Image (cartoon, grey):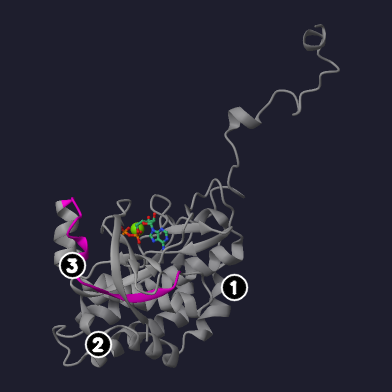
């Protein structure tokens, strides 16, 4: 099970993305990015964070630790922003927390290079989970202590929004042409060879068991939280075996990211400029 903590202080909202997560402190002295159960995106976003976040971690990808957070909305009483007040009020009870990575930077493909093997693992993982939220416009990756970390798995597994059509939806291909790591020539085949055999029924069942009952009960068409957990396993298991055959990556746009703009690097004479031949510079 995920560790459960209790929020002790609401620190500040994070406004980069759409869901208005907040930074909170908790009674274990940890600092977390909290995703609210009362957010407009709904509790399925939190289910997706748990299933995909834990799956990524079990496959050896870097995803910050996840916890569940008990929230008493009273801790936000001094929060001046009306929108945040509403969110806190609607989210009493169990919410999701992701360990806050202090000092991390948003991933920038021009400033940080990813090798083809690591890029392949991330693209394969995103293909498996049908992540539509890791584009170059909105990478949802952080660089922390020199390493790449994956965050924000709320917009994955589109099939859980329409369970009767889930099998057909999960059989669909994955278009990664817009993926933030597409330019690094991701080796998806190598990633599939290494990771797909690890995605077993047992592993998926263990991961689905980590989703709190509160976020699963009363789903139309299911008579128990466990029946719904089973559907997550059944959608991901066959997809893991074959999705690498249905990933479109496209050719990398260049062999590697440009490190600096052309006006800085395209000197007419080699850098550093030779002073030996420059009479103008050496005259004084
Ligand atoms: N674990 C984390 N550590 C540090 N910053 C984070 C972390 N998780 C999210 N953030 C920051 O908060 C922003 C919003 O979080 P995200 O999970 O992408 O939510 P959403 O896009 O749904 O609003 C991110 O773009 C990032 O800047
Ligand atoms: Mg985001």
Specify whether 209 is left or right of 36: right
Task: Give residue 129's quadrant in the image.
Answer: bottom left
Task: Give residue 22's quadrant in the image.
Answer: bottom left
Using the rendered image of the protein, determine whether residue 38 is visible from the camera's viewpoint: no
Specify whether 177 is left or right of 187: left
Tell me the SS state at disc 2: helix
* CA gap, disc 1 and disc 2: 32 Å
Q: Nearer the viewer, residue 90 or 261?
A: 90
Q: Does 271 sit above or below residue 106?
A: above
Tag on residue 190? 1
* CA gap, disc 3 and disc 2: 29 Å
Q: Does 261 sit above or below residue 179?
A: above
- Whether residue 46 appears in magenta in the rendering, the answer is no
Expressed as whole percent of the image width and height from the top left, the position of residue 174 reads 40, 67
Expressed as whole percent of the image width and height from the top left, the position of residue 238 reads 40, 84
Expressed as whole percent of the image width and height from the top left, the position of residue 161 reads 22, 73
Q: Nearer the viewer, residue 21 or 108?
A: 21
Expressed as whole percent of the image width and height from the top left, the position of residue 24 reads 32, 63
Dot 1 or dot 3, earlier in sequence: 3
Dot 3 or dot 2, earlier in sequence: 3
* CA gap, disc 1 and disc 3: 47 Å
Q: Residue at x 29, y 87 (%)?
A: 229
Using the rendered image of the protein, determine whether residue 79 is visible from the camera's viewpoint: yes
Tag on residue 228? 2
Q: Nearer the viewer, residue 38 or 31?
A: 31
Dot 1 or dot 2, earlier in sequence: 1
Q: Over which residues does the magenta segment extend?
A: 64-81
């Amino acid at each position: 099970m995920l560790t459960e903590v209790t929020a002790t202080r609401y620190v500040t909202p994070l406004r980069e993305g759409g869901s208005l997560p907040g930074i909170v402190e908790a009674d274990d002295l940890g600092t977390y990015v909290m995703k609210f159960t009362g957010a407009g995106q709904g509790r399925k976003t939190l289910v997706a964070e748990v299933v995909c976040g834990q799956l990524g971690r079990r496959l050896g990808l870097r995803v910050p630790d996840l916890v569940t957070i008990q929230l008493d909305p009273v801790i936000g009483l001094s929060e001046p922003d009306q929108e945040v007040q509403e969110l806190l009020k609607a989210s009493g009870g169990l919410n999701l927390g992701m360990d806050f990575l202090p000092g991390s930077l948003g991933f920038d493909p021009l400033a940080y290079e990813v090798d083809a093997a690591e890029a392949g693992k991330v693209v394969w993982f995103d293909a498996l989970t049908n992540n539509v939220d890791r584009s170059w416009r909105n990478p949802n990756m952080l660089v922390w202590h020199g390493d790449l970390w994956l965050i924000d798995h709320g917009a994955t597994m589109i099939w859980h929004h329409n369970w009767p059509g889930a099998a057909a939806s999960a059989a669909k291909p994955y278009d990664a042409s817009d993926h933030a790591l597409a330019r690094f020539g991701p080796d998806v085949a190598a990633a599939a060879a290494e990771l797909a055999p690890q995605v077993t029924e047992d592993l998926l069942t263990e991961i689905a068991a980590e989703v709190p009952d509160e976020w699963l009960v009363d789903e139309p068409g299911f008579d128990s939280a466990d029946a719904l957990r089973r559907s997550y396993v059944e959608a991901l298991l066959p997809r893991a075996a074959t999705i690498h055959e249905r990933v479109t990556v496209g050719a990398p746009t260049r062999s590697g990211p440009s490190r600096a703009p052309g006006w800085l690097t395209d000197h007419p004479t080699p850098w550093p400029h030779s002073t030996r031949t420059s009479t103008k510079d050496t005259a004084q």
